[in-house]
Image (spheres, rainbow, N blue to C red):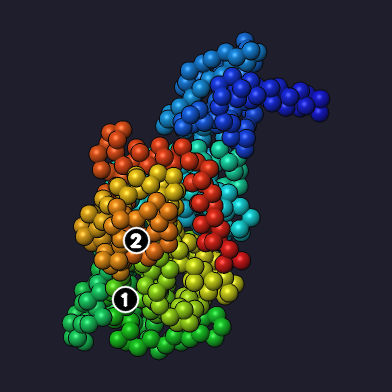
Amino acid sequence: MNKNELSITGLKNHVAVQEFRSSQRAHVYENSIQQQDGHLYFLVRESYTKFLIVAAENGDTTPSDFQGQQVTLGQFVFLRCEMSPVNASALRSKFGFTKPVLIGKDNSYGFGDRLGNAGPAHLRSVRKSGFRPVLAQQSIRELDRTNRTAQEVMDAASWSVFQEGFTEGFGADADHLKTTDHIDRMVKAGFTMFTIDPSDHVVNEALSMDPEKLDKAFSSLPWNQLRSQPDELLQRYLGKELKLKNNLIHAPSKHDVLKGMVKYGHVITHTKKLADYLENTYPDHPAELELSVDETELPTTPFEHYLIASELNRLGVQLVSLAPRFCGDFEKGIDFKGDLDQFKEDYQQHLAIAERFGGYKLSIHSGSDKFSVYKVIGSINSGSVHVKTAGTSYLEALRTVAKADPELFREILSYSIKQFSEDKKTYHISSNLKNVPSPGSLEDSQLPPLLDDDDTRQVLHVAYGSILSANSDSNSFKARLMNSLSENEHLHEKNLEHHFYKHLEPFK
């Protein structure tokens, strides 16, 4: 196609967009405009609902793989397509950049989007940050609590990428997987990053076992699955100086080795089992692995990290990232609680171990709002990192509602307070319900600042499942919340962008 043909095509595209915009009184997302095979594609919002529009010149046919209602306006025919699973699948087939890719060991940021509408703002905040976005990120627990499917999460990410015209590639994290059924569920939806959660197999009691019991537990480990024998393993570590970068050396005692293997031996075999299942069952599916050992009672010691990484490396399990249990408290929705100097020292040791075994990323789970930790990691300026956030985007949605729809926010907060005793059971938080004011006692102007109060943030955070799954009719919390966010899309996205600039800036 020569320059004149290109300019004519561009002019026709402009006319088509203007024709639809003016006749339908629709908001057009300019970054979404794409031209392919003689057809024009773009996203619009009519009232508070988004549609994909496929345009062709009058007399031409629109693509058969998209489903929608056809309307003729002037010299063009337009197909108005709902953002349905069928159309999302067609979109991914047509535009490769709307499918997830392997991120590898680049710095990356996980944007959990429990509502499915935060993706465009997430993408705008991450541009030029040096981080690759992992846009579709959801754990099995979150899927169950929000009554969403893995496919819905993937589709929301694809539509967001298309809306923003983001062609640089995004990741999709199937988070906290515990079984082969979980893997099946997420592979089917197209996820490419698989975070193995072996927390059910950690033996925390190893830390307090007497020598006789510890030795017995060590001898009874599943050595066939470990492809080793007790004496062989001891020989690999005892009397050895385990040298790391920056002259960091670990010389473990026999007690260290026994304790580490009893605590994490079943973690290693379970991780190997799931890694092999993924590779053997889906050999052609693009996949990268993260291991999460952060949900344990005590911090992961440097030697425990070394032991896990060394044994997995010996067994042929390649990691893209690993999440240790760091020192201090990584509570949901608030900043780090602990000694930052100690965190920096520990982080550098964990970083040296990661570099020793291939340079995988250190992964920060419960990463929302850990601003002081971000500054520490940014100051080290070495290695690579992956950060996972989720609840903080939900809280920014509630910040928007607190400003735009005070009565709905009062209802959500009241219900969250009511559910708190039950919902907090599966979370590590320190919120004191006595410090959360009764929403009915506050003026409208006093509601948005509640989103900056640690106690209130955590009460709202842990109740997200109860809020999003309560009822299913048009008057449910979720339906009203989504309508309010659609009606106030600009404010919602402004809040999200501002919040994630704060998250990403310290790493620079």
Identify whether 445 is placed above or below 374.
above
Does 118 sit left or right of 26 as displayed? Answer: left
Which one is nearer the viewer's eye here, 172 or 147? Answer: 147
Q: Residue 456 shows which numbered tag?
A: 2
Q: Residue at x 22, y 76 (%)?
A: 205
How far across and down, in percent of the image, does residue 236 sit? 39, 80
Q: CA distance from mark 1 to mark 2?
A: 27 Å
Q: Residue at x 61, y 58 (%)?
A: 129
Q: Residue at x 81, y 25 (%)?
A: 4
Give the quarter of the figure containing the N terminus.
top right
As helix, strand or loop, the secondary structure at mark 1 comes to: loop
How far across and down, in percent of the image, does residue 190 sit? 43, 42
Q: Quadrant of residue 188?
A: top left
How far across and down, in percent of the image, does residue 452 sit? 42, 62
**Visible in this render: residue 130?**
yes
Q: Which residue is mark 1?
A: 298
Question: Hey, what amino acid is under mark 2?
Answer: Thr
Give the quarter of the figure containing the C terminus.
bottom right
Q: Quadrant of residue 294?
A: bottom left
Question: Hey, what amino acid is under mark 1?
Answer: Leu
Q: Residue at x 30, y 86 (%)?
A: 255
Which one is nearer the viewer's eye here, 281 or 85? Answer: 85
Which one is nearer the viewer's eye here, 22 or 2? Answer: 22
